[in-house]
């Protein structure tokens, strides 16, 4: 499949080898599809085997493979040898950097205006809230995975702790959302530290496995501790958030009545939208600040080289624990929001799939990049909804899109790292140099 | 106090033994490093030099013996009882590595800022003051940047301050690693083969840098080195090891003429080496 590097230098041999590659690919396709597509077998009415041939479909598939491989080879020739930088022509690259500079503010302004633009489209508002929840989760996990380089496969545990903290405190004691929100964060952070202690000595794969198990433990405890959590039935009747004490309903005390406007159920949705936006932006702000503080630099140094950190007198234990705690705290906030939005939580919402999804967002976005994570969350959650029309092919298209992105940008959408401090000029650091962390 | 014989030693290693399973890497090694002097630890490959270093800097816990560090104020710290990062943090022993261990994805300046972690951490009120942008922290950060800039200038890397450390040339990386160790403001600087892979000109510049660290800042240096031109030029005192034991020590001149040392390096018997020497001179 791979084109020899001499092809660009010698276009004459290029065409023949191009055809050769395409021919080989077509041959492989022919062998593969001749049985899979070319011959169709079925059990006849009397139980005997009947078969018929579909050479037309077979021929068209082989032709598609032949043509497709020529197109791919031509694209390769045009782009030059593989390499993330060279893959993009200079004109496009300068355009990209221009876009890159204004993308974040533009996205923020657009996000602020989403409830105004789509006020009457409940579906889009709900989707936007969902996307923002994952943006926040992604940013939270980014502290652990992207900055500190600790692979955490059980992030959903903290999401669950946050959700159940709010759900149980609100239903049992009637505490308001605004009191429970910080408590949910603190409790999740506490669990983060608790997870941190046993895994301090583990690295890489071993760390990933233990965090994975931790996520499952939390879920199983929630399922089995029926007297507290309601088990598989979950917690229902979780109070909706109030506008600092003023409920968002159609009662006489409601916000709509107090403002003298007509009540609409969209008010609550819009309020939830701005609530999660504020929480996500808080996460972002804190993370950006922390990166420029000694603790954030220590996280990144830990990702780069743990032994060197110890030689410089950095307490790697507390550094790792603070990373876990900070990430977990944001997960807890997001969990509390999730509980108040849904009004009902059950262990089914906190499966490993959620952890994997959030981790995929962080990896796809480019580990450590705030904008990348936001874009990836938009692509993963929003894109998944976008392909809903494709029905059964949705997973296929989505999986292919992810594979393509990982080939095109192995270090995520935004792979380079911005320095936290500079003397004369802040230069982006190429992803080749930045370590991914060993756990 | 300064006239006190004991207080002139910054580091006293006494009967240090390190075993890995049945293998004895270092046996009953005793030596001292003097304050504001450069002490070199040399020996053939596999002599146990790096093991000694790892014991001193807390990466290994010695099987036996003691390592005492005496600060300028007379405070003595038992290094074998401190572990891990505490040696760098409390005992103020900084080290570099045989295979360079910079933070490649961080800029040269950031590398030096990470080295000042503990001081900055205190100034940032363990992050809380820093998060709200307290002036105390801003001053401390400015001071840290000044110190880093000063060190970048000393190692001639000021114009590369904002480049990723991984992008620097090999020799530059070596110097940056020394600058990073010095940014922790150590009492004792331990260098593991700082001249490895450097060309003659870079080695000479390194010698100059180490001498300036000793003379201008008064930092004691302990180094492992194979490049004899560097060792002989800058060392005040040399300890020679072979097969985990000390075989000689003294000034560069004394060590150079010691038949045991020559025997160890040539891999021959002592008598034979003495015969070679006598025949040669």
Image (cartoon, coloured by chain):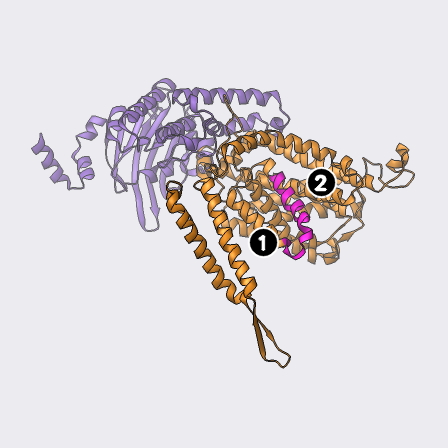
Chain colours: A orange, B purple
Task: Name the secondary structure under disc 1.
Answer: helix
- In space, the residues marked 1 and 2 are separated at their CA atoms by 25 Å
The percent position of residue A196, horizontal first and vertical second, equals: 57, 45
In the depicted view, which residue is nearer to us: A243 or A5? A5
Q: Magenta span covers which residues?
A: A373-394
Task: Name the secondary structure under disc 2.
Answer: helix
Q: Residue at x 13, y 37 (%)?
A: B273
Tags 1 and 2 both on a single chain: yes
The percent position of residue A222, horizontal first and vertical second, equals: 69, 54
Count the labels in the image. 2
Q: Residue at x 69, y 55 (%)?
A: A348
Residue ranking furthest to the bottom:
A46
Quarter of the rendering containing residue B204: top left
Q: Does the magenta segment cover residue A386?
A: yes
Q: Does the magenta segment cover residue B74?
A: no
Indicate the chain on which mark 2 is placed.
A
In the depicted view, which residue is nearer to us: A2 or A140? A2
Badge number at residue A213: 1
Write down the residue under mark 2.
Answer: A183
Indicate the chain on which mark 1 is placed.
A
Mark before the other along the chain sequence, 1 or 2: 2
The percent position of residue A156, horizontal first and vertical second, equals: 64, 48
Q: Main secondary structure of the magenta part?
A: helix
Image quadrant occupied by the C terminus of chain B: top left
In the depicted view, which residue is nearer to us: A76 or A84? A76
């Amino acid at each position: 499949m791979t084109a020899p590097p001499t092809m660009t230098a010698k276009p004459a041999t290029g065409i023949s080898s191009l055809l050769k590659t395409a021919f080989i690919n077509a041959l492989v396709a022919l062998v593969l599809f001749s049985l899979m597509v070319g011959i169709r077998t079925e059990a006849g009415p009397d139980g005997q085997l009947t078969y018929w041939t579909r050479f037309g479909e077979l021929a068209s598939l082989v032709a598609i493979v032949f043509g497709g491989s020529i197109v791919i080879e031509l694209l390769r020739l045009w782009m030059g040898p593989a390499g993330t930088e060279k893959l993009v022509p200079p004109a496009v690259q300068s355009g990209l950097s221009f876009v890159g500079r204004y993308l974040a503010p533009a996205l923020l302004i657009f996000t602020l205006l989403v409830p105004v633009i789509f006020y009457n489209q409940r579906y889009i508002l709900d989707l936007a809230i969902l996307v923002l929840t994952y943006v926040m989760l992604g940013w939270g996990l980014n502290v652990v995975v992207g900055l500190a380089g600790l692979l955490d496969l059980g992030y959903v545990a903290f999401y669950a702790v946050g959700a159940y903290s709010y759900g149980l405190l609100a239903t049992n004691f009637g505490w308001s959302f605004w009191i429970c929100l910080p408590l949910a964060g603190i409790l999740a952070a506490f669990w983060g530290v608790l997870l941190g202690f046993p895994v301090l000595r583990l690295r890489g794969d071993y760390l990933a496995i233990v965090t994975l198990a931790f996520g499952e433990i939390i879920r199983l405890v929630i399922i089995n501790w029926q007297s507290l959590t309601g088990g598989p039935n979950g917690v229902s009747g979780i109070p909706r958030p109030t506008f600092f004490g003023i409920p968002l309903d159609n009662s006489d005390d409601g916000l709509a009545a107090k403002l003298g406007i007509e009540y609409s159920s969209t008010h609550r949705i819009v309020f939830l939208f701005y609530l999660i936006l504020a929480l996500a932006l808080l996460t972002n702000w804190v993370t950006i600040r922390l990166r420029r503080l000694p603790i954030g630099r220590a996280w990144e140094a830990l990702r780069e080289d743990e032994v060197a950190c110890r030689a410089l007198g950095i307490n790697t234990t507390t550094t790792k624990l603070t990373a876990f705690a900070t990430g977990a705290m944001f997960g807890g906030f997001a969990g509390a929001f999730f509980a108040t939005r849904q009004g009902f939580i059950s262990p089914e919402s906190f499966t490993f799939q959620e952890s994997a999804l959030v981790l995929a967002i962080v990896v796809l976005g480019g580990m450590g990049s705030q904008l990348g994570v936001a874009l990836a969350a938009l692509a993963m959650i929003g894109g998944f909804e976008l392909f809903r029309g494709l029905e059964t092919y949705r997973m296929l298209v989505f999986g292919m899109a992810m594979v393509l992105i990982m080939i095109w940008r192995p270090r995520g959408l935004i792979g380079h790292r911005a320095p936290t401090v500079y003397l004369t000029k802040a230069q982006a650091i190429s992803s080749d140099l930045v370590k991914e962390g060993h756990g | 106090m300064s006239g006190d014989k004991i207080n002139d030693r910054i580091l006293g290693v006494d009967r240090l033994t390190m075993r890995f399973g049945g293998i004895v890497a270092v046996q009953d090694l005793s030596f001292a490093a003097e304050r504001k002097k450069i002490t070199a630890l040399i020996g053939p490959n596999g002599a146990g030099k790096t093991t000694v270093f790892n014991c001193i800097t807390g990466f290994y816990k010695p099987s036996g013996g003691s390592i005492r560090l005496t600060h300028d104020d007379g405070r003595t710290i038992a290094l074998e009882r401190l572990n891990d990062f505490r040696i760098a943090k409390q005992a103020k022993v900084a080290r570099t590595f045989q295979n360079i261990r910079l933070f490649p994805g961080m800029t040269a300046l950031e590398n030096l800022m990470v080295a000042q972690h503990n001081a900055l951490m205190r100034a940032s009120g363990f992050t809380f003051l820093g998060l709200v942008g307290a002036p105390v922290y801003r001053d401390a950060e400015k001071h840290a940047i000044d110190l880093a800039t000063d060190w970048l200038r000393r190692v001639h890397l000021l114009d590369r301050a904002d480049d990723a450390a991984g992008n620097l040339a090999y020799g530059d990386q070596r110097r940056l690693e020394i600058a990073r160790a010095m940014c922790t403001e150590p009492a004792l600087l331990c260098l593991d083969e700082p001249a490895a892979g450097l060309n003659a000109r870079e080695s000479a510049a390194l010698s100059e840098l180490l001498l300036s660290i000793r003379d201008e800042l008064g930092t004691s240096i302990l180094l492992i080195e194979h490049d004899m031109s560097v060792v002989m030029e800058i060392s005040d005192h040399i300890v020679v090891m072979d097969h985990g034991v000390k075989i000689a020590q003294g000034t560069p001149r004394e060590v150079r003429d010691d038949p045991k040392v020559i025997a160890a390096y040539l891999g021959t018997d002592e008598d034979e080496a003495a015969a070679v020497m006598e025949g040669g001179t």
